[in-house]
Image (cartoon, rainbow, N blue to C red):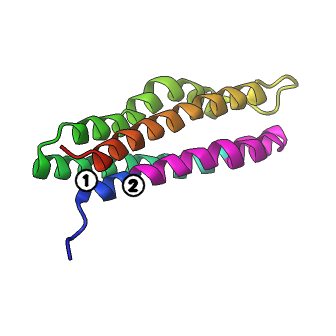
Amino acid sequence: MRSMRPGLYAFGVAAAFLGATIYIGLVEQPARLRLNGRAMIQEWKLSNRRGTLVMSGFAVLSAVIALVQFRQSGDVRWIIGGTTILASWPYAYFVMMPVNVWLFAVQLGKPVSPVRRLMREWGLLEWGHVLIGFAACSVFAWVLEMPP
């Protein structure tokens, strides 16, 4: 019996990344938006920290496994898929981090708080991670389905 190729695991981890991002957008975010401002921020702070660790881990693990598969096969599509999933890091830093900073700095005692608007913006930006995960899964599926 032939052992599994590392690339299948790279695809699986990228699919876990994609599934988690879809869960955030379809389940967590709508539930969070139903909370009052204080509860929304408290929940987001805990969820964001944990989610960042999980999503970062998925991205790095998928990319490393894709690199292992590239070294075995020499197919550059593994590097493309690994680089694509790693794009979640600069996306999180340059696109999402400014909104994160504002959310962490929100003063909830004020009569007019920007928390709900910022949280909606954050939710829309989070869909960028869905696109990154989908793109990486698509590249991995392509190379798995159509080997050189």
Q: How busy is the neighbourhood of tag 2: few (under 14 within 10 Å), some, or many (20 plus)?
A: many
Question: Do labels 2 and 1 touch, CB within 8 Å?
Answer: yes
The tag on residue 4 is none
The residue singled out by tag 1 in the image is 65
Residue 34 in magenta? Answer: yes
Residue 38 pos. (x, y %): 79, 41
Residue range in magenta is 14-43
Residue 81 pos. (x, y %): 31, 39
46 w.r.t. 83: above or below: below
Most foreground residue, 4 or 147 = 147
User: Does residue 85 appear in this view?
Assistant: yes
Element under label 2?
helix
Residue 126 pos. (x, y %): 58, 34
The residue singled out by tag 2 in the image is 13
102 w.r.t. 8: above or below: above
Q: How busy is the neighbourhood of tag 1: few (under 14 within 10 Å), some, or many (20 plus)?
A: many
What amino acid is labelled 1 in the image? Answer: Ile
